[in-house]
Amino acid sequence: MKSSRRGFLAGTAAAALGFPMIAAARAPITLRFQSTWPAQDIFHEYALDFAAKVNAMSGGRLRIEVLPAGAVVKAFDLIDAVSRGRLDGGHGVVTYWHGKNSAAGLWGSGPAFGMDANTVLAWHRYGGGSALLDEIYRSLDLDVRSFLYGPMPTQPFGWFRKPVKRAGELKGLKFRTVGLAVDLYREMGVEVNPLPAGEIVPAMDRGMIDAAEFNNASSDRQLGLPDVARYCMLQSFHQSAEQFEILFNRPRYDALPEELKAIITHAVEAASADMSWKAIERYSQDYLDLQGKVSFRKTPDAILKRQLAAWNKVVAEKSAENPMFRKVSDSMRAYAQRTCRWQHDTLVDYRMAYRHFFAGKAPKKGRG
């Protein structure tokens, strides 16, 4: 009996000593992220949504904490902070890095040869875009692992104090945009100031810029653009096919167990679908709520055609000076020629059905 009791006590003591080691082994891996968006913007919410999916799917083994823009670094400094390990990861858009290599601007800026944002993501995933972006980042010594997701709807031309009717009215206009859209609008005679999101409305309020674009009804409303400009011009080719980017510090990512890497991959896919659904829900409601408070106008076709002509010049100039730009552009063009033909031949005209059911009927206001 005494021998048995001694064995039991010894086993209990060993278990007690071993338990803290097991607990330590199961301690969650915590990654600190920052977004490039203000805390109240729906884009930051998308970043939080992605993190929440990873945290839930990993069962607590991996925890991503997301800070808003400026918490650690400025929005346009995010990729450098992630590469150097100052941050474990981040949430933004590829076109923010086009100043490092103009080819990066092709993920988001311009008409994408007729592709919509989801088709650009298809090109990135299956048409070689991912390998090309990795090649760009390696050439810049950026030690990051990039995931693209979240197809954005076509962005408005922008917010103006008076409607724009002709392309000639843009000459000399002080305008905010980013990415290769800067080059596109400069080609059209616009004076461009590529401000980060949080600086747009103060700059318009002080007269530093005359007009600006950001992204969508929800974000634009939260930023306060309807408070400083009365007219929003809808439809544009300057950013008609953009998407979001999730960045990881590559050594930090590579050190993760394979099952956690798989969770991240599938969380990106899940977040991409969820973002596109949430965008439809929220953007449409905020667009409806702004009716009567501001005036929404369609951008004239003449201006849209002028954008396309300007883009031809931008692509020719950048391709001549940057072989990587040409490489990415040629890849996108080839993919668009095949996939867009399929889309145009097979997709029904949804506008026809909408007009059939709702012609002359104003939608009712009220959330969900």
Image (cartoon, rainbow, N blue to C red):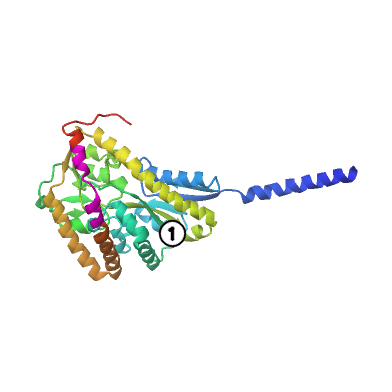
Q: Nearer the viewer, residue 108 or 347?
A: 347
The magenta-colored residue range is 340-355
Is residue 350 inside the magenta stretch? yes
Quick check: 263 left or right of 242? right
Mark 1 residue element: strand
Q: Quadrant location of the N terminus?
A: top right
Is residue 180 inside the magenta stretch? no
Picture coordinates of residue 16, whole percent (x, y): 73, 45
Amino acid type of the residue that numbered disc 1 sits on in the rendered structure: Arg
- The residue wearing badge 1 is 145
Q: Quadrant location of the C terminus?
A: top left
Q: Is residue 52 visible?
A: yes
Residue in the image at 19% along x and 55% along y? 185
Callout 1 environment at 10 Å: few (<14), some (14 to 19), or many (20+)?
some
Residue 307 lies, with reference to residue 48, above or below; the image says below
Picture coordinates of residue 274, whole percent (x, y): 38, 44
Quick check: 162 left or right of 22? left
Quick check: 21 left or right of 151? right
